[in-house]
Amino acid sequence: MMRKVSRKMFDHKQLSRDRTLVLSVIALTATIFLVFGNISLQSSSANTRETSGELHVRIAEGQIMSTVIKQPLRSMQEEIKKVDRSEHRSSVIPPFNLTVEERIEWFRKKVPEFEILKSNNLTKEFHGRVLEFFNKECDVQFFMTWISPAESFGRREFLALESVFKVHPHGCLLILSGELDSVQGYRILKPLLDREFKVAAVTPDLSFLFESTPAETWFEEMKSGNKDPGEIPLPQNLSNLIRLAVLYKYGGIYLDTDFVVLKSFADLRNSIGAQSIDVSRSWTRLNNAVLVFDMNHPLLLKFIEEFAATFDGNKWGHNGPYLVSRIVQKVAERPGYNLTILPPMAFYPVSWNRIGGFFRKPENKVESRWVNAKLLQLSGGETYGIHLWNKQSSKFSIEEGSVMGRLISDHCVICEYKYSS
């Protein structure tokens, strides 16, 4: 390291020589950086080639075997989208206080910025990659969606993945996400892949998913910019529809990424969880954060039909939890739907307005007894997992010794979560 010396000690010639020396050092450093940076990039690309090979999967009954499709090699430049994520994300959220006509006009101009609406080489491979992935022997077949930027997939979301494999070590989890279907996404999933868990992210083909369903026309109109997306960000509502379509096409279990699995789902079929019940123990509201359905289940088709027919992008929950509640209530007395409604303890053992208590460490003996009692209740066999209501709980840190802290310790597989003090 160069010593700092007063300028007064230098004459003009000395200063010129030192400037030349500094410029030489900078040039040498830049050369070294470029050389080693190129080696690092080549190494990363080679690593991608080694890990982007074939996906192996069990094909759901009734589906036709397709030829094995290998992922084409893609460069780092193709994989990592060089955009300001926060700026891009805000650019696709409609301004407030627009009329319907103004919002449609705004949306029509913004459609090219909605990557998820586009078709490309990756979306064309979607169906083949799904069949290939589930060709591998899977005890249970899980799906999640992630439409947000890859860098916002944090430790809490990763915990949801860990909990799936803690309980289902031979299960398969497919994440429908163009953002995670990338080098950055591979790095996020790598700790699980290194332990040979069956997890992958695949860019969805929405045209294929909605094809031959009641949502096909709705999607084409939305893609052309001729429908009102509403004030709620469109990706949020697309996630509500994607989960229905992917289960209809392939069957399995859909989970939100703010869900911690506590018990095996292997014995569940065609099930939805009640979020709330009344004094007579009849359900008052269902939720779509967890859905368990066979492929081609008629109720899924009814959900998709309702989504397309009554879509409203201005009402939170209208196209999600309230939708499944409306339809199940309509078909409750009709034969042929083969549905089990599980009590709140199955998936929603704590309500959204009380979730904060699960994150706080006990401060005294009374609170410690409450934590122990709650953990005992959750381990009683009726609870398959906990929906964390991320919209509410994201503002809370997970404190060591809290209900959530204890659950993490018991249901992680990598167990690198850092608690707040």
Image: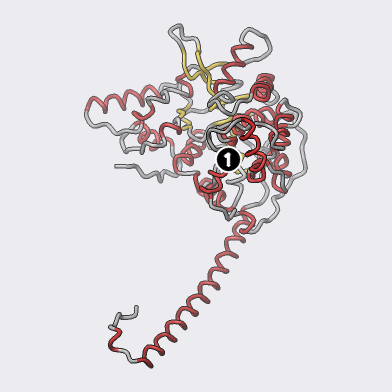
| Residue 354 x %, y % | 37, 25
Residue at point 66% right, 19% down? 299
x 58%, y 30%: residue? 254
What residue lies at 55% left-to-right and 65% top-to-bottom? 40
**Mark 1 packing: few (<14 Cα in 10 Å), some, or many (20+)?**
some
Where residue 310 sits: x, y (%)?
64, 22
Label 1 element class: loop
**In this view, 349 is above or below 86:** above
Q: Is residue 64 visible?
A: yes
- Relative height, residue 50 to residue 240 (above, below): below
Can the viewer see residue 140 in this picture?
Answer: no
In the rendered image, the vertical position of residue 410 relative to residue 43, given as above or below: above
Which quadrant, please, contains the N terminus? Answer: bottom left
Task: For the C terminus, give its image quadrant.
Answer: top left
The type of residue carrying mark 1 is Ile
For the image, the number of numbered tags is 1
Q: Residue furthest left?
A: 364
Indicate the colouring scheme: secondary structure
Of 246 and 80, which appears nearest the observer? 80
Q: Is residue 49 left or right of residue 152?
A: right
Q: Which residue in the protein does label 1 denote?
A: 147
Quarter-wise, where is residue 129 in the image? top right
- Along the viewing direction, whichever of 129 and 204 lies nearer the viewer: 204
Find residue 323 and report its horizontal and vertical position in percent. 59, 21
Side (left or right) of 421 relative to 293: left
Residue placed most toward the observer, 357 or 382: 357
Residue 229 position, x and y percent, is: 62, 32
